[in-house]
Image (cartoon, rainbow, N blue to C red):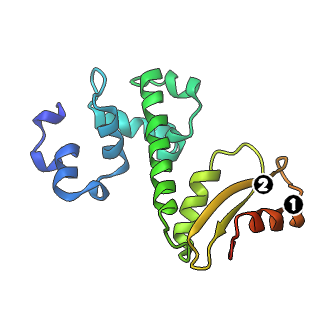
Amino acid sequence: MAITDWPLAERPREKLLQFGAQSLSDAELLAIFLRTGVPGKTAVDLARDLISHFNGLRGILEADKPIFCQQHGLGEAKYVQLQASLEMARRHLYTALQKGKVMDDPQTTAYYLLSQLRNQPREVFAALFLDNRHRVIAYEQLFFGGIREIAVHPRELVRRALAHNAAAQ
């Protein structure tokens, strides 16, 4: 049965409009992104299959292009669209923080750092430079390491903090 034949309250787009994006399941969110299904499967059914195959939304979002594009119903256009969506989300978070968002909430700090560091293939030592009200002045990736370790030079960290006139890190 096509999604257009479903009751209005069960259709992902209508559900989002009526109750907000947070009311949708992962499969429903992905179905909206996919827009269409494949022969014999609705977009929601396809989304469920993909979530199962990739072990969740994160697996889909982090999949390499060749693996992503091999899946039925996905291709290069969807890969590009998904990567663009991820980058827009990262920039949205970054912009919100650059507008003077106070970084005294551990969850906000964690979300920001995860968005910056999530896909790094190696160890990265980064610093958030803050003013005296814990607003972001700058974010810098300062040191890079291997798979298991990284050499951090405190002198360089202090030098960068002074250059930004940071009051907190």
Q: Earlier in the sequence, mark 1 or mark 2?
A: 2
Q: Is residue 32 left or right of residue 152?
A: left
What residue sits 52% from the left and 46% below the top? Answer: 58
Q: Residues within 10 Å of mark 2 (few under 14, many from 20)?
A: some
The residue singled out by tag 1 in the image is: 152
Q: Position of residue 54 (x, y in %)?
A: 52, 39
Q: Which mark is residue 59?
A: none
Mark 2 element type: strand
Residue occupying image coordinates x 59% and y 56%: 114
- Which residue is denoted by mark 2 in the rendering? 142
Image coordinates of residue 123 in percent, x first then y, are: 78, 51
30 left or right of 93 in image: left
Q: Amino acid at mark 1?
A: Val
Q: Residues within 10 Å of mark 1 (few under 14, many from 20)?
A: some
The foreground one among 6 and 127 is 127
Above or below, 50 relative to 19: above
Q: Which element carries disc 1, helix, strand or loop? A: loop
- Residues at discs 1 and 2 in contact (Cβ within 8 Å): yes
- Is 12 left, or right, of 107 in this rendering? left
- The residue lying at 43 percent from left, 23 percent from top is 77
Q: Which amino acid lies under the numbered mark 2 shown in the image of this protein?
A: Leu
Whole-percent x and y of residue 16? Answer: 22, 51
